[in-house]
Amino acid sequence: MPFVPSTGAISFDNDIEDVFEDQSTPAMSLSEYYRNGTNVQTAVTAGNVDTSSVVTSGIPTSGQISFSDFRGQGYDLIVQSAVFDRNNTTTGQDFTWTVPAGVTEISAFIVGAGGGGGGNDGVSGPTSSAGGGGGSAWGYWTVTPGTSYTLRIGAGGASGNGNTGADGGDGGDTYIKSGSTVLLQGGGGGGGVSNTSSSNSGGAGGTTTGTQRGGGGVGGQGGDGATNTASGGGGGAGGYGGVSSAKGGDGADADGSGQQSGQGGAGAGGDDINNNFPQATSSGGAVGIFGQGNSGSTSGNTAPRVSSSRHGSTYSAGFPGNYLVPASGVGSVTEATAGTFNNPTTSGVAASPGAGGGGLEDDTLGFGQKGGDGAIRIVWGTQPDGTTLRRYPSASAVSGD
């Protein structure tokens, strides 16, 4: 329901243009709305707009125009999507979604959960490896209104426990099923190993599969452990291209090698961390679920809503413009948190959706980072032109609500 705020400061780029940007050609200045008082009304006649909800009565058709004239202006969108993630769904449990009336095709993007990082006993020597990132998958197919599908949001893998030696848990699979047939599945990333110096010990990246799969990538592998050094970094979540061209970045090994950026809109791998609990940068990068955007960068910020981010597909310089994920709530990317104490409730959590958790270095007793949870977004209907169907992977093709 895009409306210009009724209170507080108003920005032309982030408020007025955000409301009308995909409804015909965007205006470049307030004067373009002023020249023709029907411009805003004309701009909201697209196929995904509830035209009966349009509010533009406060915008003058003559005289001086100001930002405050746009307060409360906007419209409601016709519901054309469903999002399921940690904010509105119990992870790790099946639930049912039913195709709405009048819908004959759907397109979906899903991402599996990340694996948990290994813990450490605090004795100088072996460090711990990290969890792998969740795999992703997208596709589209013909449906019948009233048909029910079985969905599951994968739960992030548990933190490895340095007190007991338990390894990090595997992330859960995220899927859409018709009966026993897997239509789309993003596999959960493997868990990291506690107290290990073995090479290739990082959790494997999650897989991508399904009978309706058109694309999607494997998750990045968690970073390996070593001896008397840092812990491994978490693997990044898979992206939007093919299996190899949308791979999540591998996490840094404990010796600092092997860290990769994401491909095809995927998340980047996390950092190796020494002399501390897992940090926000230990986590692999998550992936946005609103269409392909920029790939996550190993040098990127841990915040999602920036142009250079560790997370994939949260920002795009082109249409629909800038931020592809909401700042918070359902469908958002949750930033990773750092571990602070030898306690499972303060172990730190990798970014969601899909990031692998970082491991714990050798001289610190405690837990690895918990893996990030999975997510699903399903879209249907048409793009703003009223005729072109909404289909992944393009962000411009699945924007609008």
Image (tube, helix red, strand yellow):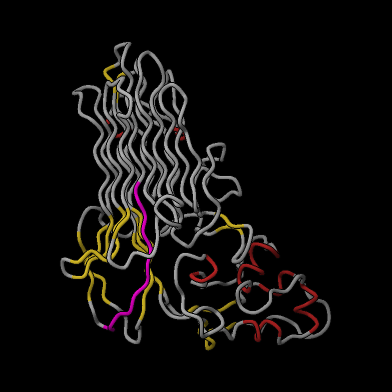
Circle count: 0
Residue 399 on the magenta span: no
Residue 235, above or below 217: above
Residue 197, above or below 151: above
Image quadrant assignment for residue 141: bottom left
Q: Whole-percent x and y of residue 313?
A: 50, 54
Q: Whole-percent x and y of residue 269?
A: 45, 38
**At 37% from the left edge and 55% from the top edge, which residue is drawn?**
136
Query: Which residue, as the protein is rendered here, is positioned at the far right?
Result: 63
Image quadrant assignment for residue 209: bottom left
**At 40% from the left edge and 61% from the top edge, which residue is drawn?**
215
Residue in front for this viewpoint, 17 or 182: 182
Image quadrant assignment for residue 335: top left
Q: Whole-percent x and y of residue 58?
A: 68, 81
Residue in front for this viewpoint, 221 or 96: 221
Residue 130, above or below 300: above
Residue in front for this viewpoint, 76 or 282: 282
Magenta segment boundaries in residue numbering: 134-145
In-image side of 365 versus 389 (left or right): left
In-image side of 164 versus 323 (left or right): left
Residue 155, above or below 316: above
Query: Which residue, as the protein is rendered here, is positioned at the far left?
Result: 180
Query: Which residue, as the protein is rendered here, is positioned at the far top?
Result: 124
Residue in front for this viewpoint, 7 or 150: 150
Residue 140 on the magenta span: yes
Q: Whole-percent x and y of residue 266?
A: 46, 50
**At 36% from the left edge and 35% from the top edge, which residue is drawn?**
222
